[in-house]
Image (cartoon, grey):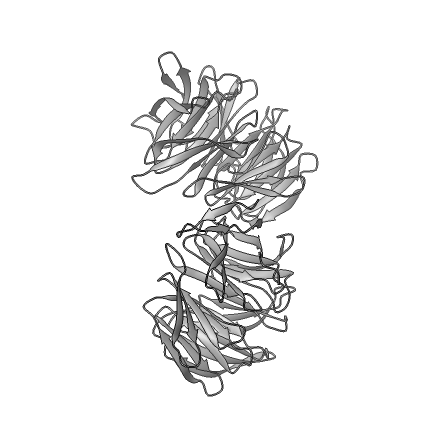
Amino acid sequence: MENKIMSGDAQEVPQLELEAVVGFNGRVFSGLRVHPDREHLIYPLGSTVILKSLTNGKQQFLHGHTNNVSCVAVSKSGRYIASGQVTFMGFRADIIIWDFPQRTIHARLQLHKVKVEDLAFSPNDKYLVSLGGQDDDSIVVWNIEKKEAICGSPASAQSAGHCLALRFSNKSDDVFVSAGNGTLRVWELDLPNRKIRPTECQTGQLKRVVKCVVIAEDDDFFYCGTSSGDVLKVNLRTKLLNSCWPVKQKFSKGVNSLSMLKTGDILVGSGDGMCTLSSGSNFKTLRKVQLEGGVTSVALRGEGHQFFVGTDAAQIYRCNYMDFKEELIATSHNSAVKGVVFPFATSELFATCSQDDIRVWHSETSKELLRITVPNMACNAVDFMRDGKSIISAWNDGKIRIFTPESGTLSGIIHNAHSMSVTAIAGTRDCRRIVSGGGEGQVRVWQIFPGSHQLVDTMKEHKATITCIRVKSDDKECVTASSDGACIVWDLVRFVRYKMVLANTLFRAVCYHPEEYQIITSGTDRKITYWEVYDGSAIRELEGSLSGSVNGMHISPEGKHFVTGGDEKLVKVWGYTEGEVTHVGIGHSGSITSVSICPNNKYIISTSADGAVLRWKYPHAS
């Protein structure tokens, strides 16, 4: 039985089948976890928590948060997962306890304002302790079985800074440690009186911002990683500072995560991307490995023969304890994805562009095949030339860059293509011309020669940013959408305006119907409008979404269906002639920026502002 979703007019719409998600929020500290069953990776992406099987790579999704997930914790037995989120100023942020075997919500807890900073389970799954963000700064202990708060307390003394990390002891359900900016406390839970009582740890002259805490197996000592790049060793019984290391060579850019191995050795992840194994007895560096991006999570699988490392460049690595070699197992965009495009007549790969780079992905496996980066520049739009020999791209420094798809080498560049940034781009069918649009509203046609280029013509009609360009199949016409509320069909032989349609909206997307006598547009007024190209009249208007603009749209190759996505975070498949929604895809946790149907009608790819790329099964037989 397909699970169905209710739409506004109470009819049931079947859901799209989500096949794969490319994405990982590497900015959540200790967000990457390995489940105690050693079979699942757990990590956040936007407002979703993803469970990924380590045996077959299959993903499952925990939906329930209303905003970005800010912390993740797993209980020792593996029965529960807890996740906290951020929310808007003045509102309360949810904590959700998930039942892992059932994959359902066990409890939803609300007390903290604005953000949940960290979570920790007690060793016997009795309690969950939670820490609010800087606007809340309180610690609350929850009874998991009764799903209610037992007691709470301000996290740090008035004189100290904000608290950032929590850790439960390994043996006792009543002792946990909190640490942060100039605060380091051991708490004891007094259940009969419903109180938690803190004891300050004495660190003498040492002033540190603690970012992570790990407690030794036997509960004798605990270790705190600091933003200064050293580790404090504190006695849990006497609450006294035992030592601080390394004395000379500190960890560069601070210690972001710590993990304790059975041997007593410590894995240290630092902000410069180094993962270091330090001896537990004399703190000497035993081994280290350099990764891309700052390390934000180190998660042990089982005893730690294998461990996983997450970095803020949205990469996940697998490392073995024996040889300390890293293996990159997942990559994703770490900023908003702006666009997605398939090459002509092939569905095996697709390209996406984002703030930092262009990436080419293999459709079936979601593996990254190629990454093209231009330092300090943002890519606004990307397209494949029809012959597949080049990737053309629009950049915010006003340049058009042409790359080869195999190696990603720069094969051509058009300087000062537009006076402001280049915002939209399309290639013609004969692969000799590029049509580009800029932030100032001009549309320009470029002739491309081997090793050189020439400006053919500039068409000035639009008053604002060009958001989308589509070229007709005979290369004699193109249509441009702009945020000035106009869509213009241009004659590409005489370079004049052929027809113009106006609407009270900022147009975001435009498509030719494959038979090219109609265009459909979408934009910020939530409407999807069909227009006759011949006389520019509006034929039909559909309510595209219930809230927010419709940012992406694509028509299937035979023209029977089209797909839209926008700020309401739903992927919708429509029948073109009926104008009805046939399927809805729920899975994005950020605004959808673009959608594309692959040429052989197998998948829909959608991208969103949280850096996610989702692959859906296309629901209609071609």
555 or 43: which is nearer to us? 555
Q: Residue at x 49, y 36 (%)?
A: 229
576 or 190: which is nearer to us? 576
Residue 276 image point, x, y percent: 59, 36
Q: Is residue 132 left or right of residue 322?
A: left
Image height check: is 362 above or below 35? below
Q: Quadrant of the N terminus?
A: top right
Q: Quadrant of the C terminus?
A: bottom right
Q: Residue at x 62, y 43 (%)?
A: 58
Image height check: is 611 above or below 319? below
Residue 346 image point, x, y percent: 64, 65
Q: Residue at x 40, y 23 (%)?
A: 141
Q: Is residue 80 visible?
A: yes
Residue that protrudes farthest toward the bottom in the picture: 494
Residue 264 image point, x, y percent: 60, 24
Image height check: is 13 above or below 321? below
User: In the picture, residue 597 is in which quadrant?
Assistant: bottom right
Image height check: is 579 above or below 471? above
23 or 305: which is nearer to us? 23
User: In the picture, residue 461 is in which quadrant?
Assistant: bottom left
Residue 143 image point, x, y percent: 43, 22
Residue that protrudes farthest toward the top in the picture: 192
Q: Is residue 307 left or right of residue 252?
A: right
Q: How many marks?
A: 0
Q: Residue at x 59, y 38 (%)?
A: 41
Q: Is residue 203 visible?
A: no
